[in-house]
Image (cartoon, grey):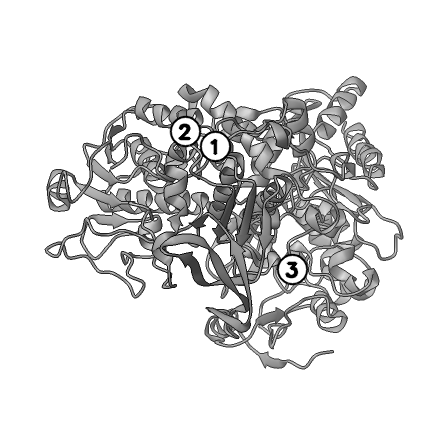
């Protein structure tokens, strides 16, 4: 057992003070101690308490008293005293039955009711991790996965799980897309609801699904066992659905805020900000220097990856919302930044990164800028590309350049990049695509000098790159100058990055820049040093991915709304199907090991102006969504006491407030999360139940000790043989106590019959979704509910 500090206190206020003022380490309470001792001994947690505060000796903290309106039970009242109390037997017999059923006599003699209702989860993987081959940091402990989903789940929930924190796939998405939530909607056949979830953080999934690096898939827990869920391919289907039904998702706001905003730059960040600002009711005008809106989406990403008609459909949808887009207008040339600021209530700069960086190698002036190559690709179709091409860089832009050059007719395309292949910033899919089309990839090579003869480009000398980062992780490439290689090339296309062009900000325009020469903004709001002026996208971060730009634009829109005093009306999720509040997954979907792949045009049939791949069918999308594990905690609340307290409409009394038992036990996965860090349970109040019949029954393996596999608590009142009031709560079947609200509603005002019993049992189980190994709980739960109802007379 680990060592820990021990503090005795003589009041709840003293305990609260210690909890509030303990600066270092983790501090916990000990009352009965039956739970805490196992935690300290069995090493089941990744983080252990440094200090234990003993509250056992607080005066008047235990005991059962009868008042005018009900019973008050001190938090430190032992379970054995509750089980044997004559007061409880007369006025709350169900609670006495529950207390008596708790574990063993040893536990009942030491355990307290306050400790019981704040106890930790009952889960094999949580409590006995070493039995599974070593400590397992499950999602409940802060890990990423519930091991019961794919392992032994005989004791787990039959009604679904609950989130403990953001799923790892969502955590990897820069926009924070709730991926498991929209996958669940798709499994229900509700594409409209899935679309609405995505649109809350990303207004252009039809575009991002085609060009995003899909960081989310790197976080998918399935990737550790077979293939990660093809999130991007599912998103593509939903994104296409959104554009096909754009009137549903790009509605003009019902009311206007009277505020006007200008956005400089119609790239991903600017368009994202425009959507959320307009949705809030602001008048939005976008200025862009190009002929068409879309920024890099329109001009830099090849049509075979992102067809331009899809970009145009999205832009058209924004215009239908009432967003005004002014193109062919350059800020600083056609109109000054200061004039823009005078005209609008707020301004957002999202000008992107279009400028060529200077590498500083000899002969660099003879090379071409890769981004210019993509923008001017039509000119290169006239044979200008040559037979041998060298592309420098290892990101997705470099891949686009290399593949485009190959498709334009270059016989040999070589790509050289500093990074080793495993560290290349390009996505795995793009690297594979480049190789499939014959691009030669040379990882770990840097640029030395351009080879030329009389001003004519002949190739590039490369030097071996031995590492790209220093011991602190900072970019600091190191070279072996003795190992060089010459690559012959008629054209060298430089795709080693882009720079931000802030030339539109003249000397008179004062805005703070950071050490990188980018616009400095507030991390929280994206506001610049000029009040009411915001900036985002590449202008503040440097070249970044499309989805990062979208997330940045969304954050800026929120900051601008706050600055303008605009509170966006709550958007009712009318398209999202919600059941009992528990998350679910498809056990059959876990058996599908291979992810859904897009059907692609054969390599020899591909071109630069036709999309390479086709979207998934609805059947394929449904099958792929079923592979999502909807990672959460599927352990059960096995407390014997909490279902009874809910059934009896009890109130939890703390040193700060009073909380209804139904809220205390069901809103959060851990009931203690309903308390502040310095808050303690002092007592439990049960209203007068003298006119009710109360009961508690549970199924367990060994009557002498085990927690509930399934339990049922009830409290009901009859008037003239008909049910006047009733509460039924199940335990051991869900992450929190499961109240049978629909059954209760069905029973009110009715006289119990055998037909009604069967109907109620079916209603009680209609939302059940058992796991692979706990289907037995279905029959046991039905049996308990049927037994309870059959005894009502």
Residue 141: give its label. 3
Q: Are dots 1 and 3 in contact, CB under 8 Å?
A: no
Residue drawn 30% across the image and 34% down it: 280
Residue 201 image-quadrant placement: top left
| Camera sees residue 650 | no
Quarter of image, res 332: top left
- Label 1 neighbour load within 10 Å: few <14, some 14-19, many 20+: many
In the picture, measured across the screen, residue 754 lies left or right of residue 214, that is right
- Seen in the picture, residue 535 relative to 301 is either above or below; the reply is below
Front residue (pair 555, 433): 433
Q: Nearer the viewer, residue 92 or 248?
A: 248
Q: Earlier in the sequence, mark 3 or mark 2?
A: 3
Q: Secondary structure at mark 2?
A: helix
On-image quarter of the C terminus: top right
Residue designated by label 1: 306
Q: Which mark is residue 484?
A: none
- Label 3 packing within 10 angstroms: few (<14), some (14-19), many (20+): some
Which of the two marks, 3 or 2, is nearer to us in this view?
2
Q: Label 1 vs label 3: CA separation?
A: 41 Å
Image side of residue 296 versus residue 106, left or right: left
Q: Is residue 79 left or right of residue 533?
A: right
Is there a contact, CB below 8 Å, between mark 1 and mark 2?
A: yes
């Amino acid at each position: 057992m680990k060592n820990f500090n021990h503090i005795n206190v003589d009041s709840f206020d003293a305990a609260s003070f210690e909890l509030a003022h303990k600066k270092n380490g983790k501090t916990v309470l000990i009352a009965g101690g039956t739970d805490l001792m196992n935690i300290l001994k069995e090493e089941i947690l990744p983080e252990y308490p440094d200090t234990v505060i003993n509250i056992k000796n607080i005066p008047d903290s235990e005991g059962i008293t009868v008042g005018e309106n009900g019973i008050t039970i001190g938090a430190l009242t032992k379970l054995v005293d509750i089980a044997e109390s004559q007061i409880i037997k007369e006025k709350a017999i169900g609670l006495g039955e529950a207390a008596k059923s708790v574990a063993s006599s040893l536990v009942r003699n030491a355990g307290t009711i306050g400790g019981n209702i704040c106890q930790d989860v009952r889960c094999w993987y949580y409590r006995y991790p070493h039995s599974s081959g070593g400590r397992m940091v499950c999602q409940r402990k802060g890990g990423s996965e519930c091991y019961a989903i794919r392992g032994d789940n005989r004791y787990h929930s039959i009604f679904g799980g609950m989130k403990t924190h953001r799923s790892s796939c969502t955590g990897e998405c820069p926009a924070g897309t709730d991926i498991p939530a929209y996958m669940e909607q798709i499994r229900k056949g509700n594409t409209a609801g899935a679309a609405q979830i995505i649109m809350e953080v990303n207004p252009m999934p039809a575009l991002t699904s085609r060009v995003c690096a899909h960081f989310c898939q790197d976080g998918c827990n399935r990737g550790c066992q077979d293939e990660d869920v093809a999130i991007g391919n599912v998103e593509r289907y939903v994104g296409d659905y959104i554009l096909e039904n754009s009137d549903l998702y790009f509605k003009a706001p019902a009311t206007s805020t009277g505020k006007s905003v200008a956005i400089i730059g119609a790239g991903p960040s600017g368009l994202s900000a425009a959507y959320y600002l307009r949705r809030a009711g602001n008048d939005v005008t976008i200025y862009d220097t190009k002929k068409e809106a879309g920024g890099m989406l329109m001009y830099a990403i090849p049509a075979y990856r992102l067809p331009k008609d899809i970009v145009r459909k999205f832009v058209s949808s924004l215009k239908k919302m009432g967003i005004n887009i002014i193109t062919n207008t350059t800020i600083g040339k056609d109109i000054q930044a200061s004039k823009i600021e005078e005209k609008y209530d707020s301004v957002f700069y999202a000008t992107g990164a279009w400028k060529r960086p200077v590498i500083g190698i000899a002969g660099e002036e003879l090379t071409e800028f890769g981004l210019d190559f993509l923008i001017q690709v039509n000119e290169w179709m006239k044979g200008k590309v040559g037979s041998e091409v060298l592309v420098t860089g290892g990101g997705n832009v470099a891949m686009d350049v290399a593949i485009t050059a190959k498709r334009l007719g270059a016989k040999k395309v070589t790509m050289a990049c500093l990074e080793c292949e495993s560290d290349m910033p390009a996505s795995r899919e793009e690297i594979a695509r480049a190789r499939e089309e014959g691009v030669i990839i040379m990882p770990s090579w840097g640029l030395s000098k351009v080879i030329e003869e009389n001003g004519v480009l002949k190739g590039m000398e490369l030097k071996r790159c031995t590492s790209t980062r220093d011991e602190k992780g900072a970019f600091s490439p190191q070279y072996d100058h003795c190992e060089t290689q010459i690559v012959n090339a008629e054209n060298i296309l430089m795709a080693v990055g882009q720079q931000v062009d802030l030339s539109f900000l003249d000397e008179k325009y004062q805005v703070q820049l950071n050490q990188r020469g980018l616009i400095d903004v507030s991390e929280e709001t994206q506001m610049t040093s000029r009040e009411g002026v915001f900036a985002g996208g590449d202008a503040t971060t440097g070249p970044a991915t499309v989805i990062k730009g979208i997330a940045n634009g969304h954050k800026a829109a929120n900051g601008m709304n706050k600055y303008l005093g605009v509170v966006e009306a709550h958007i009712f999720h009318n398209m999202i199907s919600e059941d009992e509040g528990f998350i679910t997954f498809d056990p059959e979907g876990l058996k599908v090991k291979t992810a859904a792949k897009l059907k692609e045009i054969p390599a020899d049939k591909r071109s630069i102006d036709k999309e390479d791949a086709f979207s998934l069918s609805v059947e394929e999308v449904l099958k792929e969504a079923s592979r999502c594990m909807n990672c959460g905690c599927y352990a059960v609340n096995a407390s014997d006491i909490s279902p009874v307290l809910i059934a009896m409409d009890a109130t939890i009394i703390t040193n700060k407030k009073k909380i209804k038992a139904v809220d205390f036990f069901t809103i959060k996965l851990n009931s203690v999360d309903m308390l502040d860090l310095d808050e303690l349970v002092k007592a439990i109040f049960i209203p007068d139940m003298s006119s009710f019949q109360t009961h508690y029954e549970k199924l367990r393996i060994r009557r002498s000790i085990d927690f509930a596999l399934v339990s049922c608590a009830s409290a009901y009142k009859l008037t003239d043989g008909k049910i006047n009031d009733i509460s039924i709560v199940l335990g051991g079947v869900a992450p929190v106590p499961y109240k049978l609200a629909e059954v209760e509603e069905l029973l009110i005002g009715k006289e119990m019959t055998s037909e009604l019993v069967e109907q109620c049992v079916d209603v009680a189980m209609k939302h059940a979704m058992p796991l692979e190994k706990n289907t037995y709980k279905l029959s046991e739960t039905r049996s308990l509910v049927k037994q309870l109802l059959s005894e009502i007379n």
